[in-house]
Image: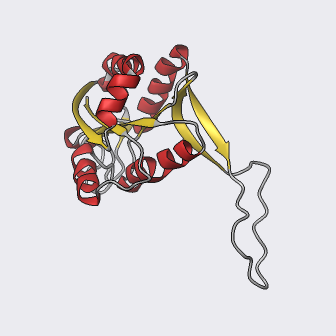
Amino acid sequence: MKIVANFDFNGGKEKVSTHYKNELAEIASVIAAIDAMAFKTKVSKEKTMPGRMLFSPSKINKEFKRLLAPMGWKNHKVLCDYVYGEMLSGYEPMKHSSSKPFRDMDFVKSGTKLGVEIQFGKYSFMVYNVCAKMTIFSNLGLIDAGIEVVPVKHFADEMSTGVSYFEQFAWDLTKRGVSNIDIPVLILGIDA
């Protein structure tokens, strides 16, 4: 795969290229090392493209994990405690199953404050990653900048219907503007 576009959100390009130059180089080397064609293994069952071979986002994500782990990049989970606000009469808060609710960042490298998200999902997940999750992880003191890796339209068109893409995401962030709580994020658009 290759990086074919980037978008600077709230000074993310400068922050990442200045303070996380080595980490950015690692991310770029992993993107370049992934042969996307090896992951064009999903047979579409969708009405609009039955039988068509598509890229498998879950398998590409696993390949990112496999290649980044030896470099010290790890998933980072934060457990959530949902006891906020006033419970009104008659409402009992949900009881959690054996697994506690959490939020996680795809990758944080030990010894750094750089968070990385790989997103081949719906538009709402891209926006959530940059405008909510990265802010939460920053407020917790875990990151101070982020990288979001997303497909460009050409690549997303070869995945299941509904996968969002770089061009739409960058346009929306531009029109949204930057809030005083947003952290610097470099968005990388990748293609097969």
Is residue 178 visible in this depiction of the protein? yes
Q: Is residue 174 left or right of residue 78?
A: left
Quadrant in which the C terminus appears: top left
Give the residue drawn at x 40%, y 47%: 121
Front residue (pair 122, 80): 80
x, y percentage for residue 119? 40, 41
x, y percentage for residue 95? 79, 63
On the image, which quarter does residue 151 sit in?
top left
Toward the front, the furthest residue is 180
Is residue 40 visible in this depiction of the protein? no
Give the residue drawn at x 28%, y 56%: 177
On the image, which quarter does residue 81 sit in?
bottom right
Give the residue drawn at x 29%, y 59%: 176
x, y percentage for residue 130? 41, 47
Front residue (pair 169, 146): 146
Residue 142, compared with residue 179, is above or below; it is above
Residue 35, compared with residue 171, is above or below; it is above
x, y percentage for residue 107? 51, 31
Residue 118, compared with residue 94, is above or below; it is above
Front residue (pair 22, 65): 22
Quadrant in which the N terminus appears: top left
Give the residue drawn at x 73%, y 50%: 100
